[in-house]
Image (cartoon, rainbow, N blue to C red):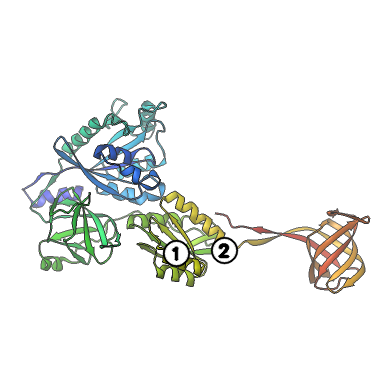
Amino acid sequence: MKKVAEKQAETSPKLIPRPPVAVVMGHIDHGKTTLLDAIRKTSVASAEAGGITQAIGAYQTEYHGKKITFIDTPGHEAFSSMRARGAHVADIAILVVAADEGVKPQTEEAIRIMREGELPFVVAINKIDKANADPNRVKKELAEREVLVEGFGGTVPVVNISAKSGQGLENLLETILLLAELEELKTDPARPGEGVVIESHIDPKRGATATLLIEDGTVERGDFIVIGNEIAPVRIFENFQGQAIDRATASQPIRITGFSRPPGLGELFSVFRSRDEAEAHRGAREVRREMPPAIAPGEEAKTVVNIILKTDVLGSKEAVEAAIRAIASPQLANRIVKSDVGDITESDVKLAAATANAIIVGFRVKMPPVIRELALRSGVNVVLEEVIYELIDKVKAAMLAAAPAELKRLDLGRTKILALFKADRSKQIVGGRVETGKIKIGARFDLIRNNVKIGSGKVLQLQSNRRDAEEVGEGQEFGILTDADTTIAAGDGLEIFTEEKVIPQL
């Protein structure tokens, strides 16, 4: 929020302290959401599908009369851009590292994001009550990544905690408030509010809904919010707990409905006291903060599976799109032909049915029984999941199932026909000698005459020395019963081969 602070200093002398916004970051399953549960005395983690956070949650708590806003970010690798967005709107970061596992890939990513955003941060070494906890090992691994904590050669605050038991949480909160004091965070409550969209989705009953973080000023019921070219009146107005409110101030997360579409993540909003003022400023502001680039598709594949994607919120949509696009190989890839928020509808099924090689992918959305029945009748494959890594596994399986297997030819050998003994329509009995390689029962062959392929067939039975055989090798004579589309003659050659199905790889 540095730009907001700079603007405040230039435009208003009536500044008062505002609560800090702290983003919680770290590797998956290192206890970020459990930490927030302990702070808020709620049970959000147990309600998360698969026990992992899959959207940005914003919450506010109070400690010794001082408020702190927390932003919980997903740890799974698919949600990289969501973590970057969470850090972008924060004042302070909490880097959660599990004492029993140490620094992991998303820990390193969080360190990079914090450095790029010049965020002051505190390291919370979690799970210190576990038998194999080793806080010193964590500090050493952080030092190897140039993160030097207090008592280990540096000045970065570090707190040992147990989110499960509550040990060290008061120390952590005090450290956050101390960092906030050093940042001298201010707001002008007389100003109309402004801030950023941190999440949005389609509410089945209320329509397009957005979670906003107020960076400065005040939002009141009856105001008008401008996001890009859209104006929404502040009517349905709630705090992070879903409780109706009439007023909200800086650093407070709020939920607003009344948009014609879900606002884009990272878009800026401004508040005006009248519709006339809002109309005058419509579209005048920057509409989107810079976000990390999307993952680009890989090489052009032989087979492409078309995907209709539906997700619960825009943040999920962005992450799932990137994760799906990354599923690619030279043999098999995908193309997202439609991507939207909301439950699976009749039009989604009809689009999939009318699109070649298409599947529907739904993440944390519902599919009414009547729509499920329509998909079944239409032969449309639907993948539904609540957990990101399970969804990606199912998408891979669905792509493999949708891809046609190729037949690969394996050459076995070449024979010379010495005699035709019997011919009855396509069935013929012939004798010959294996010149190179081998001939085997069940193999296929190309019939060669004067160095030109004139037909093909299959080896139905095989004998050598008047005994049934599975295969006959180089230099040996044989007799075979064939099923061929052309009459075989003495002097012809048979090029023997087999075929195997090759399933595309991912």
| SS at badge 2 | loop
Classify mark 1: residues with Cα within 10 Å, few (<14), some (14-19) or many (20+).
some
- Name the quadrant containing residue 92: top left
**Front label number (2 vs 1):** 1
Percent position of residue 439, x then y: 83, 57
Q: Is residue 327 visible?
A: no
Q: Residue at x 83, y 54 (%)?
A: 470
Q: Quadrant of residue 272?
A: bottom left
**x, y percentage for residue 237?**
18, 57
Q: Is residue 273 visible?
A: yes
Is residue 413 toward the left or the right of residue 37 in the image? right
Amino acid on which disc 2 is placed: Lys
Figure disc tally: 2
Tell me how far mark 2 sits from mark 1, CA to CA: 30 Å
Label 1 sits on a secondary structure element that is helix
Q: Position of residue 457 (x, y in %)?
A: 79, 67
Q: Quadrant of the C terminus?
A: bottom right
The residue that label 2 is drawn on is 302
Q: Decide: few, some or many residues near mark 2? Use Cα within 10 Å; few <14, some 14-19, many ≥20.
A: few
Mark 2 in CB contact with mark 1 (< 8 angstroms): no
**Viewer-nearest residue: 377 or 30:** 377
Q: Is residue 317 left or right of residue 58?
A: right
Across and down, in percent, residue 156 comes to 27, 32
Please, what is the three-letter code of the amino acid marked with disc 1?
Arg
Q: Which label's residue is closer to the chain start, 2 or 1?
A: 2
Residue hosting label 1: 372
> Would you say 270 lies left or right of 113 here?
left
Camera-side residue of 314 and 329: 314
